[in-house]
Image: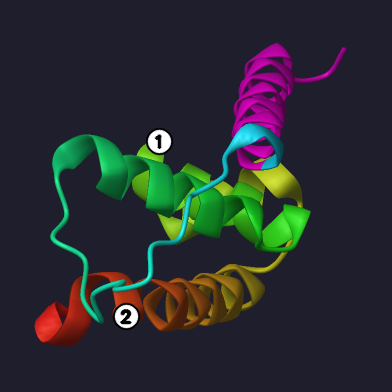
């Protein structure tokens, strides 16, 4: 094994994505007749909503997003760990943020 740290990081990210995906499959929300246009978030429901939104990203985008914003790696570190260009990491991060912003807008209203 050439780089055990990179392997372990990749395994941890993949395990986290598996957990997120399994939660998405099990999560359902009952609709009421009068559903408000903007939900009032609390920490737990916001985390669940964000987890579901991340799970809907393409796997590579979710992986890069998690490495960037959950693990706190820089774009350069992500590029080196995944063997891709730093520009590609930047593009994927930008697109993932746009998609998440779009999906979370109904939940948070004008706060985004």
Residue 58 lies in the magenta-colored region? no
Q: Is residue 79 visible?
A: no
- Please state which of residues 79 and 96 is positioned toward the viewer in this rendering: 96
The answer to which of 107 and 99 lies nearer the viewer is 107
In the depicted structure, whether residue 53 falls above or below residue 63: below
Position of 85 relative to 45 (above/below) = below
Image mark for residue 97: none
Q: Residue furthest front?
A: 33
First-in-chain label (1 vs 2):
1
**Circle 1 is placed at which residue position?**
71
For the residue carrying disc 2, how many other residues have a C-alpha within 10 Å: few (<14), some (14-19), or many (20+)? Answer: some
Question: Is 7 or 2 nearer to us in this picture?
Answer: 7
> Residue at the spot x=33%, y=79% of the render?
106
Gap in angstroms between the C-alphas marked 1 and 2:
24 Å
Q: Which residues are magenta?
A: 1-24
Say whether residue 43 is left or right of residue 66. left
Examine the rendering and report whether any part of residue 75 can be seen: yes
| The image quarter in which residue 26 lies | top right
Q: Position of residue 89 (x, y in %)?
A: 59, 68
Residue 102 rendering spot, x and y as whole percentages:
43, 83
User: Residue at point 12% right, 79% down?
Assistant: 111
Tell me the residue that label 2 is attached to.
105
Where is residue 94 drawn, in percent x and y? 47, 80
Which image quadrant for residue 62? bottom right
């Amino acid at each position: 094994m050439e780089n055990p740290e990179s392997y372990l990081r990749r395994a941890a990210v993949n395990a986290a994505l598996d957990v997120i995906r399994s939660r998405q499959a099990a999560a359902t929300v009952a609709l009421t007749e009068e559903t408000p246009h903007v939900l009032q978030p609390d920490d737990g429901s916001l985390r669940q909503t964000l987890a579901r939104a991340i799970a809907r990203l393409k796997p590579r985008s979710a992986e890069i997003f998690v490495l960037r914003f959950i693990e706190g790696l820089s774009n350069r570190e992500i590029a080196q760990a995944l063997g891709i260009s730093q520009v590609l990491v930047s593009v994927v991060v930008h697109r993932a943020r746009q998609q998440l912003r779009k999906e979370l807008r109904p939940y948070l209203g004008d706060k985004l």
